[in-house]
Amino acid sequence: MKGREGDLVPHPARAISHGMARKHVNLGRAPAKADLPSKLCEACRRPFSWRRKWARDWEQVRYCSDRCREAGR
Ligand SMILES: [Zn+2]
C-alpha cells in the first residue's frame, strides 16, 4: 500500500512542462501598444490614439489631424 504514495509526488518532468506553458501565455499577451491613451476627435468623432508628435501637448490635442482641427474651428 505504501507504493501508492509515490503517485502523489509531483513528477519533475511534469512541473517543468507546466512552467513552460505559463511562459508561453506571457509571450502571447497583447503588446504595449494597447497601453497608449486614446481620444475622440471632436471633428470627425472617430477615436484616435496617442502619437509621438503629441507627446508634449497630448492634453491639448482635440483633433485627430490638422485637417480636422481646421474643420473644427
Ligand atoms: Zn478627426
Image: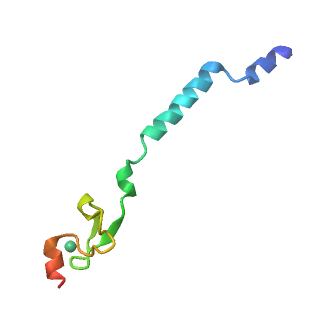
Task: Identify whether 51 is placed above or below 64.
Answer: above
Task: Identify whether 3 is placed above or below 43.
Answer: above
Ligand 1 occupies quarter: bottom left
Colour logic: rainbow
Q: Is residue 21 left or right of residue 40?
A: right
Residue drawn 74% across and 20% down?
7
Of the pair 2 and 60, the residue shown nearer to us:
60
Of the pair 28 and 50, the residue shown nearer to us:
50
Most extreme residue toward the right, as rendered? 1
- Where residue 35 appears, as percent x and y from the top left, is 39, 56
Residue drawn 26% across and 74% down?
41
Q: Is residue 64 left or right of residue 21?
A: left
Most extreme residue toward the front, as rendered? 56
- Where residue 54 appears, as percent x and y from the top left, is 26, 64
Q: Is residue 15 left or right of residue 44?
A: right
- Where residue 32 appears, as percent x and y from the top left, is 38, 50
Q: Is residue 15 left or right of residue 36?
A: right
The count of marks equals: 0
Tell me which corner region of the image, top left, top right, bottom left or bottom right, holds residue 1: top right
- Where residue 3 appears, as percent x and y from the top left, is 81, 14
Of the pair 56 and 2, the residue shown nearer to us:
56
Residue drawn 74% across and 22% down?
9
Tell me which corner region of the image, top left, top right, bottom left or bottom right, holds residue 37: bottom left
Task: Identify whether 73 is placed above or below 2.
Answer: below
The quarter of the image holding the C terminus is bottom left
Tell me which corner region of the image, top left, top right, bottom left or bottom right, holds residue 48: bottom left
Residue drawn 27% across and 76% down?
62
